[in-house]
Image (cartoon, grey):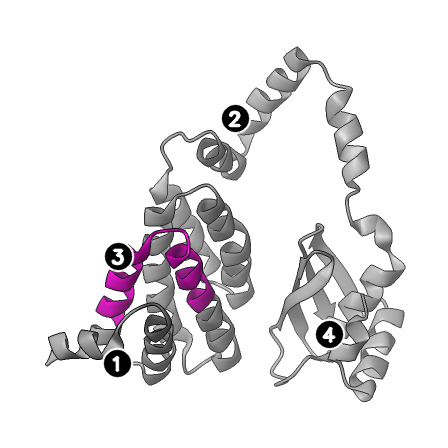
């Protein structure tokens, strides 16, 4: 993965210095993403998402307008510490070596102690989705934009994968309200999350959920007073529906 191509040379030098100074703390790492904290003039949250071992997107809570030294520091750390990533072969071997009885007992105990895992398991097994749980979890994530981004990338993507489209639209409505709140205080995060919301709408539309998506977008477009939200979601609507027809209804 030639990730250094995403950065300016001076940023790479500074990022490597941060890595060498042990300024990187890995919070969580998987084959799909890295969450980390980098200590500089302040403590900054970094999230890097992967798809097919290539960088899909990056986020940092620092004010720098482009790919930054904190992201580079995390990537240098990842290059030099491959052990932070789980190995699928090891996971397969672990599961295959456990009896079905022991696996069930382990799962029952873990589900009883981990509400997040329990709700993911309910979604996975097509049981009734606990919408209240996901709404409360998202509201808790509003404390930091990076947590909202993580929630979109993990929880909402998981819900989409398992066909819980109604829940995803409800959560998207909460995110739109959140975007209005952070518009003036964290514009970079505002833009990152807004683009992710655009991707969610397109993804839902492409999964034969056309009318609810168009109704959701149409309601926001006709009632929202934030220009950037309006512009982005109008563009989203124009790619999947008839915007002119929508505005005729408004008149």
Q: Left or right: where does residue 88 sit relative to residue 156?
A: right
- In primary-sequence order, the first of circles 3 and 2 is 2
* Magenta stretch bounds: 197-220
Q: Which residue is mark 3?
A: 211
Seen from the viewer's position, the closer of residues 237 and 55 is: 237
Q: Is residue 224 visible?
A: no
Q: Which residue is mark 4?
A: 70
Q: Nearer the viewer, mark 1 or mark 3?
A: 3
Above or below: residue 124 compared with residue 11: above
Seen from the viewer's position, the closer of residues 46 and 127 is: 127
Q: Label 4 to label 2, Cα distance in Å?
A: 37 Å
- In primary-sequence order, the first of circles 2 and 1 is 2
Q: Give how far across and how far down residue 143 sits, in percent.
A: 48, 63
- In primary-sequence order, the first of circles 1 and 3 is 3
Q: Label 3 to label 2, Cα distance in Å?
A: 38 Å
For the residues bearing labels 3 and 2, Cβ distance under 8 angstroms: no
Q: Is residue 135 visible?
A: yes
Q: Which mark is residue 112?
A: 2
Q: Which mark is residue 225?
A: 1
The residue at 46%/75% (across/down) is: 190
For the residues bearing labels 4 and 1, Cβ distance under 8 angstroms: no
């Amino acid at each position: 993965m030639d990730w250094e191509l995403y950065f300016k040379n001076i940023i790479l030098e500074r990022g490597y210095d941060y890595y060498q100074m042990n300024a990187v703390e890995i919070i969580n790492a998987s084959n799909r993403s890295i969450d980390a904290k980098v200590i500089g003039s302040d403590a900054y949250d970094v999230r890097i998402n992967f798809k097919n071992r290539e960088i899909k997107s990056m986020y940092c809570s620092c004010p720098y307008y482009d790919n930054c030294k904190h992201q580079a520091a995390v990537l240098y750390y990842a290059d030099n510490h491959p052990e932070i990533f789980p190995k699928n072969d090891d996971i397969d071997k672990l599961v295959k070596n456990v009896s079905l009885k022991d696996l069930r007992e382990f799962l029952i105990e873990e589900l009883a102690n981990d509400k997040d895992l329990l709700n993911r398991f309910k979604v996975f097994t097509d049981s009734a989705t606990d919408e209240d749980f996901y709404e409360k979890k998202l509201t808790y994530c509003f404390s930091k934009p990076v947590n909202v981004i993580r929630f979109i990338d993990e929880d909402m993507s998981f819900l989409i994968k398992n066909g819980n489209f109604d829940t995803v639209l409800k959560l998207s409505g909460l995110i739109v309200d959140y975007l209005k709140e952070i518009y003036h205080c964290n514009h970079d995060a505002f833009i990152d999350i807004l683009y992710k919301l655009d991707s969610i709408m397109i993804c839902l539309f492409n999964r034969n959920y056309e009318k609810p998506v168009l109704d959701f977008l149409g309601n926001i477009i006709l009632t929202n007073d934030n220009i950037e939200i309006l512009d982005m979601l109008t563009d989203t609507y124009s790619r999947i529906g008839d915007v002119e027809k929508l505005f005729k209804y408004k008149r």
